[in-house]
Amino acid sequence: MNDCVFCKIRDGVIPSEKVYEDETMFIIKDIDPKAERHYLMIPKRHFKLLSEMTEKDTEDLGRCLKKIPELSSLLGLEGGYRLVINQGDDAGQTVFHLHVHIMCGQSLDFPDLRRSK
Ligand code: 5GP
Ligand code: ZN
């Protein structure tokens, strides 16, 4: 059984606030936002880490990244935005289905990324 929370969101088993979807990926609002606006862009194909990408995953992630600026007005990216891909424990990765954080809607100082433990 697949226990991956993002696969479950992809399949509609867990609800989410989806703001965009195409054949390759979907974008949802993060349930615990760390910026004024915080989205997660999630490739539909499950893989954990950049180090595990197949050729197809590589192609898909490239398409995903290229799509972000095209969604500028939908996501409100006009003022700038930050992309983050956490990889592994030291980065604080908690969901092991690769995803891209999209943060925007405010001035993003670098220390804002750090989590308080
Ligand atoms: P990571 O720490 O793995 O880079 O990021 C995982 C992100 O997924 C976190 O920012 C967390 O708030 C978000 N998240 C975890 N579970 C859910 C969920 O069920 N729904 C949504 N929308 N976001 C989630
Ligand atoms: Zn998954």
Image (cartoon, helix red, strand yellow):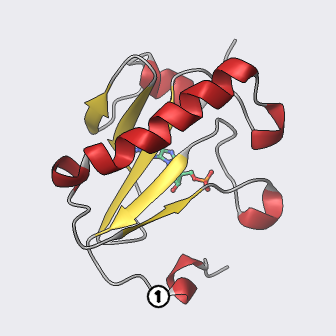
Name the residue rendered at 66%, 25% in the picture: 57
Question: Residue 18: x and y, percent?
Answer: 28, 35
Rendered image quadrant of residue 76? bottom left
User: Front-most of 11 and 43?
Assistant: 43
Q: Is residue 101 above or below residue 71?
A: below
Rendered image quadrant of residue 60? top right
As shown in the figure, which amino acid type bears the numbered disc 1? Asp
Q: Residue furthest top?
A: 1
* Left or right: 34 in relation to 97: left
Q: Is residue 76 above or below residue 115?
A: above
Label 1 secondary element: loop
User: Front-most of 26 and 12?
Assistant: 26
- The reply to whether residue 3 is in sight is no
User: Front-most of 74 and 94?
Assistant: 74
Q: Which residue is mark 1?
A: 109
Q: Is residue 108 above or below residue 9?
A: below
